[in-house]
Image (cartoon, rainbow, N blue to C red):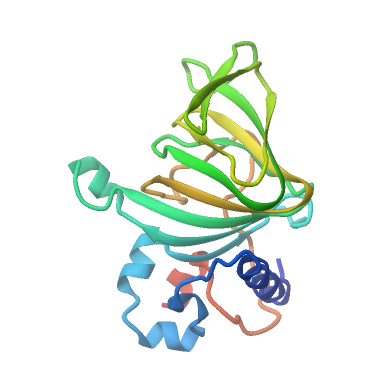
Amino acid sequence: MKRSQINDILKEGDAFIRSFGYVLPPFAYQSPEELKTSDHAMIKERGMGWDITDYGQGKYDELGLFLFTVRNGLVDDIKNGSGMLYAEKIMISRKDQLSPMHRHFLKAEDIINRGGGTLVLELFAGAEDGSIDRTSDVVVPVDGRLKTLPAGGLLKLAPGESVTLMPGVWHAFWGEGDDVLIGEVSTVNDDRLDNDFEMKIGRFANVEEDETPTHLLVSDYNKYL
């Protein structure tokens, strides 16, 4: 992705988020220089901030996702069984924009439609070896009630509705009818190690620096901070 495209997506995404009355924390709006000179250690260590990805495939409108990690614990907190055991994200899935089939090894997550169109999730259970089980039903909690779908069934969430996905549940999702604002509440989030994709793709975008970044992405931190 070109940095100029990412800068445009950040601006458009922030406006979309604000249209639903959700405001990002102050560190979201720091320039790279301001972030570098501020107390950024926790933000960097925990992977908090902007995350625009096309999964390294160069077709963001078709295959991509907008994310902002608002808060996050550490994997060591999970190992120790105490501390900050949770994370929160706000995301945007554009109409017909696919977030590809994947599972998490550690993270349990509530995926919440915060507004916009319908959020569609394609779901599979995990087989004993961790691969996709293409024959068995998948059972997921939907707003406190268990729902059973056939393998590859489509779960459609209207604004206000949510689903809980436990580790190992395979899922892909996209917006239907309009762009969708998505909330995610989960156990500690580790995007570098806790994503297993069906496709042979990367988690982060490959960035072509055609202009100066307006704000840094999580994947920029090691380079700039």
Q: Position of residue 52 (x, y in %)?
A: 61, 62
The residue positioned 23% from the left and 41% from the top of the image is 79
Q: Position of residue 137 (x, y in %)?
A: 59, 14
Q: Is residue 134 above or below residue 18?
A: above
Of 24 and 207, nearer the camera is 24
The residue positioned 61% from the left and 70% from the top of the image is 18
The N terminus: image quadrant = bottom right
Residue at far top of view? 135
Horizontally, residue 52 falls left or right of residue 5, namely left
The residue positioned 60% from the left and 23% from the top of the image is 124
Q: Is residue 191 above or below residue 152?
A: below
* Quarter assignment of residue 172: top right
Horizontally, residue 40 falls left or right of residue 7, namely left
Q: Total of numbered circles in the picture?
A: 0
Of 163 and 126, nearer the camera is 163
The residue positioned 52% from the left and 16% from the top of the image is 127
Q: Position of residue 107 (x, y in %)?
A: 41, 39
Q: Is residue 26 visible?
A: yes
Horizontally, residue 38 falls left or right of residue 124, namely left
Q: Position of residue 41 (x, y in %)?
A: 31, 72
Q: Is residue 55 visible?
A: no
The C terminus: image quadrant = bottom left
